[in-house]
Amino acid sequence: MKKLSRKLLIATGSLLLICLSATRTNSCGPEYMPDECRVMLFRSYLANMDNLQPYYYTQAFTSAYDTDPLKVDNHRNCEEWRQFTGKQVSEKDVYEVQYAMTADNFLYAIKHSSLVENPFIKWLLLPQNKKALDYFSFAKTIEFTQSDATDPWQEHSDSYNTAFYDSLASTAIRQCEQLSSSFLQERYAFQAIKLSFYALLAATRPATSVSMSKVVLWYEKYLLHKKTIVADWGLTYYAQALHSPRDAQLAMLQAFDHSEEKKPFALRYLTRKELLQLKPTISETATRNLVNVVLSIKNPGRALPEIQEISKTEPRNKYLPLLICREVNKLEDWLLTPRLLQFPSGPPGKYARINREKDQQYMRAVRTHFISMQSAPGPYKDLLTLAIVYLYQLDRQYHEAAALLRTMHTTHPRYIRQQAIAQVINQIYTSDVTKAAVQDTLFQQLSRVIRCGEETYNFQTVGYESTPAPSISQLYQALGWQMKAKGEMVKAGLLFLKAHLLINDYYGIWSSFYDENDADPDPYRQIAFFDKYATPGTMDSLLAFKHNTHKTRFEQLITPKAWADDNYYLDLKGTIQLRQKKYRDALATFNRVDECFWEDNYAYPDYVGHRYIGKARPLLHIDNTPYPDYPYCSKKLVLRDMIALMDTLAAARRDEDKTRLSLLLGNAFYNISRPGQAWMMFSYGKWYSERPSISHFRWAGFRFSPNDMTYYYSYYECTDAIRLYHQALALAGSNKEMAAQATIMLAACDEAVQLFKTDNNHYYSPYRKLLKTRYGQTESFAAAVSHCPDIAAWNKKF
């Protein structure tokens, strides 16, 4: 069965890949695991059903390959064996033999009894226990056929065919008929039933009604209504062998309920369509509610109707805590994830707003029902209280949440921790978080959450493990947004860094293995928030905060364990000033940066470079004026030259000088814009869907936001450069060489902008036609045709 399910999983995954491969994407971008990009401040473990972790809410398609995380069924099996021995051995002794020992090692051990130390094997080797030893040897032999290949060069042995398994099944049934011990009878019967199914899987012909009827007969004779683990495991085979679909579904529901290990198989077998057809035919409460439970677990959407029926008819149903937590987790994913993590990106459209309003209405309906459940007799009062509190908070009704929190007096560690999380949420959204007293209270509350520790999750999904973010990280993120809203940019940025959450924006190379105690391998992470939202004054405040030796305890909590070098913060301050066109202020800031900083760090040498800023790539073989390169990479040297060009141009009197200087300064502004050679003067990376899509950078997930709107024209549309090229063209007069060069650069700007906007790499600027018609006889045009392949190709075509 294991090999079959693995093949089914591979086949399903392959089909998904085929379907998904048709989707057009831009570059690579960040890789998001489903549970890393959702909020889970209402922790799923509050259900206190750790063995049902595979069925906690997750966006992912759950395969639940570890079907019984706490090994409940295994321990139950071992306990039944311990009881059978008259409690002469421990459950641990049985477990070691049953599950930790390979079939080979067991068979070797019983042949060399003098080497045996395990008490359970010693018990099996006693003469009076020979029948138990025979069964265990038989079961281990079957285990060998399941997990050990007879030939290492073959995936399957030809000897393990239908006849082989039928023979073993017949042997097991003969033992059932000969034994008086019901314990061993039941186990042999289970082996016979299981082996019959292996025989069917190995068969080249379809299963016959005769072979299925044997399974039904054996199960009903030896296992039906028995409260043993093998009877519960056998239900999955019995259900598949039953002729009546209704009876099969009812048996599979019992398998789901009675066995932890068989739950995933039962869930895959039971379809929503069949269950919805089955439900009206059932009047018995427990079975009807089992249908409701499975329907709810299989429903990624709204499952309140099932919860309502279960809570009304069976308020102590053991699955209710799981279903309560799942529904709250869905609601916070739908309502809070977009607000906290910005998934999806951009302002909500019409239908997103409509759906959000529907989700809010549904959330209130869920809360109303939970309130009615809490007021009725039942065992889940504290869980319901915490759920209602959180739903009030999702609805921004913090006063009601606080009032309900004050009524709660719990001693359960998990509930205490969730209570602490709820108190932090209320404090964040009801207080002025910029005030020192409030920050001190937050320090105490956050410290309480930290002391409670983080629970461990492993949402088992197809192909990987997906783990939700720690609750403390989500609280830091929420507090960071609130600090930003209040204008506390320094603390907001440090909270974002502290949170280290994967959100729908780029904050450096995200890694789940990041340790804040280590030096950050990606220095951009340290400045990413400030790159987006800071002013030069913010950077001064940040540096002052960094070097302040008298921080409050809240400030100590959010202080990075490993700061970036001061030069990074100064570089960002100067870059912000350059974006704001405060060039002399920017140069003054860059003068405070270490001389070799840009040469030795980040990707500055590649994308600020060493080439003179007034030389543009489209003119490299046209303007042969010998401008010396910079001796080392330096924003300071680049900006110094740009300011010198500005000053010289402002002082120029002759049109010839103004033309040349306008062209050079235009080249400088072109170079520090997005298509230029020194674009890292202005930005720190390129967004993965920034066009052209053929541009791949190692920071493929970078998003120049919100600066992409603030500095759109200067950076993306090259407006500063275009203005100067037009100025050069107007001043050129009879100097056709200068005019031709300005026209070439206008064409380069126009095509770069169109390529960015439309991803159309077949667009030809009208300036190309102007270049050919007006300046086709110039040396500049001839050089362009000789050295620029695309201009040469265009020239031949048009």
Image: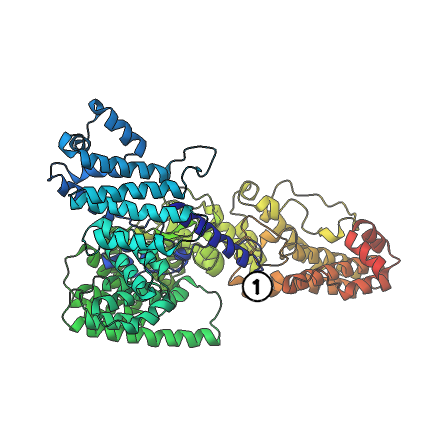
- Residue 260 makes an appearance in the image: no
Q: Position of residue 784 (x, y in %)?
A: 81, 53
- Residue 695 makes an appearance in the image: yes
The residue labelled by disc 1 is: 711
Residue at 46% over, 56% down: 530
**Amino acid type at image mark 1:** Tyr
Which of the pair 413/662 is nearer the observer?
413
Characterize the local packing of mark 1: few (<14), some (14-19) or many (20 or more) Cα atoms within 10 angstroms.
Answer: some
Question: Farthest residue in the top direction?
Answer: 114
Q: Number of labelled discs? A: 1
Q: Position of residue 359 (x, y in %)?
A: 37, 73
Q: Secondary structure at mark 1?
A: loop
Question: Farthest residue in the right direction?
Answer: 777
Q: Position of residue 778 (x, y in %)?
A: 87, 56
Q: Position of residue 63 (x, y in %)?
A: 38, 54
215 on left or right of 409: right
> Is residue 2 positioned above or below 777 on the image?
above
> Is residue 641 positioned above or below 488 on the image?
above
